[in-house]
């Protein structure tokens, strides 16, 4: 039995890209309007579609039934495609017409994507989302331009006029910026956190001339990068003033392949979301201050017509007519027994399968390596660092990926490749919300009263 190695992420693709079945699946998707697939489990979905997207460079929109499914897939496809630009399209709020403020990081991600699709020359965009997020409309390209300000070095612009423009775009003036939608003024310096950037900008003026533009870190306040020009984009949420409204299907490239988890569930869930929104709107006491649900959410009948112009792949189809059925099994449970794991690894190797043992980080790799060394099994398997969400065995392709967190029966949390640094934001919000008499805990001085 030979030792197993996996050197780079690209070698993960080689097996699937060279597979005659994956080639046949990719060709079928390229040549047909509808493709129905069944049998994906674990992280196998991300391997197959990464290989297909590498073979045929086309824009792709992945729509999952749930937020959790979409985030685990995002985690996997980002892990396997660290060199690609992948966007996540989240919901703005969990419940329509609730008292809770929209999630600013979610608004930032939605704005980043809409701005990229409308104005970027790169059309081969990979988007991951879920039904709830898809159900929400946003402003169109014309409104987006109206909600934008472009600034560049050496530009002459009235400092006071720029302040007025930011107020008109619904930016909030604060003492210092900590999240999207805020700006701060100190002397001839303007700090601004637009909805289209992961970090805020610091713009320095000499009179009415812009002399320097740089992005900076919220926590350390240190400059990260100098910029020749920037675009400041406001909130793209639909408001009562919004005149030009669209959904995600209005924006994406016509060449986009839409990957739907289940088309029947997609239609029924969209209908439920819209009906729930209408019910909440009808029961609201302040309707005159709210956006009508017909503007806020997509129309399922219009979307059904829109979908007809795109190639569609249903990857967890419930249809009786399936084009492709895969023979993939989930990672077995070993109940933390390494003897069972070793027996399984030996049997798979004897059957001609390649097995990769994937670890979340280097610490877990060392832990597994030590266990195999103690069991005198270290010469036949070498754990690799590849944080997949869930293991699987592809019977026909004779390949298996096992994850350390499933072996140890440990919960696996998805991680964003893009991380909005909001630790300081949370801390400052907590401080600002304190009232006289509240109890606080200090790291050095213990508990006290505010």
Image: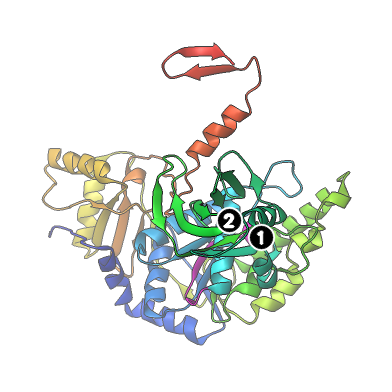
Q: Is residue 341 above or below residue 133?
A: above
x then y, percent, for residue 381: 17, 52
The residue lying at 67 percent from left, 63 percent from top is 147
Q: How many marks?
A: 2
Observer-nearest residue: 183 or 247?
A: 183
Checking the image for residue 195, the label placed there is 2
Q: How packed is label 1: few (under 14 Cα within 10 Å), some, or many (20 or more)?
A: many
Q: Is residue 100 above or below residue 108?
A: above
Q: Are marks 1 and 2 in contact (CB under 8 Å)?
A: yes
Observer-nearest residue: 164 or 310?
A: 164
Looking at the rendered structure, the secondary structure element under dot 1 is loop
x then y, percent, for residue 322: 53, 75
Write down the residue under mark 1: 236
Task: Please say whether residue 370 is visible from this viewpoint.
Answer: yes
- Magenta part of the protein: which range? 120-135
Q: Quadrant of residue 227?
A: bottom left
In the image, 279: left or right of 178? right
Q: Quadrant of the N terminus?
A: bottom left
The residue lying at 26 percent from left, 57 percent from top is 356
> Which of pointers 1 and 2 lies earlier in the amino acid sequence?
2
The residue lying at 56 percent from left, 51 percent from top is 192
x then y, percent, for residue 212: 46, 57
């Amino acid at each position: 039995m030979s030792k197993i190695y996996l050197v780079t992420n690209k070698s993960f693709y080689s097996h699937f890209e060279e597979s005659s079945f994956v080639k046949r699946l990719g060709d079928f998707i390229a040549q047909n309007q509808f493709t129905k697939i069944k049998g994906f489990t674990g992280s196998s979905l991300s391997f197959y579609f990464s290989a297909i997207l590498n073979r045929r460079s086309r824009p792709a929109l992945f729509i999952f039934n749930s937020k959790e499914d979409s985030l685990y897939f995002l985690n996997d496809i980002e892990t396997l495609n660290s060199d690609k630009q992948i966007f996540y399209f989240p919901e703005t709020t969990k419940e329509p017409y609730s008292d809770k403020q929209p999630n600013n990081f979610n608004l930032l991600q939605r704005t980043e994507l809409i701005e990229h699709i409308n104005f970027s020359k790169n059309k081969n965009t990979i988007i991951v989302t879920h039904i709830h997020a898809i159900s929400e409309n946003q402003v169109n390209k014309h409104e987006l331009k109206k909600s934008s300000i472009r600034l560049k070095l050496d530009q002459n612009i009235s400092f006071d006029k720029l302040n007025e423009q930011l107020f008109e775009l619904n930016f909030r003036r604060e003492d210092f910026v900590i999240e999207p939608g805020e700006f701060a003024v100190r002397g001839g310096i303007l700090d601004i956190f637009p909805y289209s950037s992961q970090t805020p900008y610091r713009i320095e003026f000499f009179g009415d001339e812009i002399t320097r533009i740089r992005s900076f870190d919220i926590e350390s306040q240190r400059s990260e990068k100098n910029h020749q020009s920037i675009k400041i984009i406001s909130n793209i949420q639909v408001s009562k003033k919004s005149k030009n409204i669209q959904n995600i299907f209005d924006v994406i490239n016509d060449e986009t392949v839409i990957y739907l988890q289940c088309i029947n569930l997609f239609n029924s869930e969209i209908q439920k979301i819209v009906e729930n929104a209408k019910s909440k709107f009808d029961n609201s006491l302040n309707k005159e201050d709210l956006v009508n649900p017909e503007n806020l959410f997509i129309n399922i009948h219009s979307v059904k017509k829109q979908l007809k112009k795109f190639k569609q792949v249903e990857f967890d189809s419930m249809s009786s007519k399936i084009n492709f059925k895969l023979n993939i099994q989930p990672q077995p449970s070993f109940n933390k027994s390494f003897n069972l794991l070793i027996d399984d690894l030996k049997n798979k190797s004897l059957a001609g399968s390649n097995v990769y043992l994937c670890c979340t980080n280097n610490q877990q790799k060392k832990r597994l390596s030590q266990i195999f060394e103690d069991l005198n099994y270290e010469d036949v398997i070498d754990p690799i660092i590849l944080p997949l969400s869930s293991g699987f065995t592809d019977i026909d392709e004779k390949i298996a990926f096992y994850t350390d967190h499933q072996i140890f029966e440990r919960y696996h949390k998805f991680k964003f490749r893009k991380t909005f640094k909001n630790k300081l934001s949370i801390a400052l919000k907590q401080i600002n919300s304190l009232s006289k008499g509240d109890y606080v805990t200090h790291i050095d001085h213990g508990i006290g009263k505010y």
